[in-house]
Amino acid sequence: MGSIFGHLFRVSTFGESHGGGVGVIVDGCPPRLELNTEDIQTELDRRRPGQSKITTPRKETDTCEILSGVFQGKTTGTPIAILVRNQDARSQDYEEIAQKYRPSHADATYDTKYGFRNFQGGGRSSARETIGRVAAGAIAQKILRQVAGTEIVAYVKRIHELEAIADPTTVTREQVERNIVRSPDPDFAERAIAAVERARDEKDSLGGVVECAVRNVLAGLGDPVFDKLEADLAKAMMSLPASKGFEIGSGFAGTLLKGSEHNDEFYTDESGRTRTRTNRSGGIQGGISNGEPIILRVAFKPTSTIGREQRTVTRTGEDTVLAARGRHDPCVLPRAVPMVEAMVALVLCDRLMHQTAQCQLLP
């Protein structure tokens, strides 16, 4: 009921923020892929809470356990179950929101839909659910690297009114990981840290934009007309917690250009491959990857749960005020970077398997 993503490379996430644990079942992973917990843990460590002064202080190691689907260091082709146990939940911090709705959070809509909700830490609506996505994405990224040398690098492009300077065609993971903001622009990172700290001290929060570049993408991925590659990517990005906007290539800025200015002219390179001189299409044309880098951006709203007093209502409709307690990110952007990379990888891996099945079955 909404917890399954993908078709051939299919993932199903489970668990709540303050339950026994969270995780994922990955079905359809090809057999004989070398895989161990370190492959997954590396990505989970980038997503985990408590990793810097501008993230939530909740202390979780997010240590993963592979329960099935791997034998003697290789995938067997059967479902891979991965579990991360919750260790630092403080459920008492959420007793007040059992009756009061947090503005712009999922409390009211979950009650409206289900007539019942897990209010501890937000339950299933918590960003802790993304642990399963990042774990599965680590597997998908390994497949893409092995098959095509595909490289997925996301980074923080904007926080509130501050914008980083970065070239998506050359940015590296090493550059991104040099600071706690996860931006390749060190000057921007310094200013962004100060801005997030100010918002936190004021019991407020900030939003921003994550940009993602995918290089060495196989051409031909995507299935028109309803399963266009950018449509799949849009759904993947908009399924992330706090996401509020998606664009690819020139995005909304492209509406300011004429066709003669926006079109990507073709040429043939030294190897005989058809290329584009510009990449305003963002690596996708007609819903199919063209082999150029895929460039996309995702907008994330300011964190909903803040310590500043706000007007709201109770479950019974009475006017009240709420100053939320608990441990929350004053800005989700740094920890959203590995989430964006994971969802991009899940989409591309699934589409790669579709392309192999349909278009490479016959010579």
Image (cartoon, helix red, strand yellow):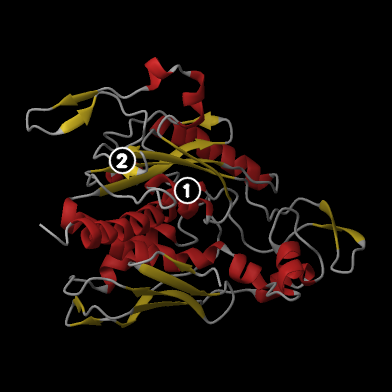
Q: Residue furthest right?
A: 318
Q: Which residue appears at 39% of the width and 73% of the height?
A: 63
Q: Quadrant of residue 46?
A: bottom left
Which labelled disc corresponds to residue 234? 1
Which labelled disc corresponds to residue 188? none
Dot placed on the residue nearer the N-terminal end, 2 or 1: 2
**Residue placed most toward the observer, 103 or 52:** 103
**Residue placed most toward the observer, 278 or 241:** 278
Is residue 141 visible in the rendered image? The answer is: no
Is residue 73 visible in the rendered image? The answer is: yes
Residue type highlighted by circle 2? Gln
Q: Secondary structure at mark 2?
A: helix
Give the x, y percent position of residue 255.
51, 24
Judge the density around disc 1: few (<14), some (14-19), many (≥20) Cα neighbours within 10 Å.
many
Q: Which residue appears at 49% of the width and 25% of the height?
A: 253
Residue type highlighted by circle 1? Ala
Location of the N terminus by quadrant is: bottom right
Give the x, y percent position of residue 78.
28, 81
Judge the density around disc 2: few (<14), some (14-19), many (≥20) Cα neighbours within 10 Å.
some
Q: Residue furthest front?
A: 362
User: Total label count?
Assistant: 2
Position above or below: 88 against 277: below
**Residue placed most toward the observer, 92 or 70:** 70
Looking at the image, residue 106 sits to the left or right of residue 82; the answer is right
Give the x, y percent position of residue 351.
31, 56
Instruction: Mark 2 vs mark 1: give the one in front.
Output: 1
* Residue wearing tag 2: 175
Position above or below: 173 against 82: above
Looking at the image, residue 285 sits to the left or right of residue 360; the answer is right
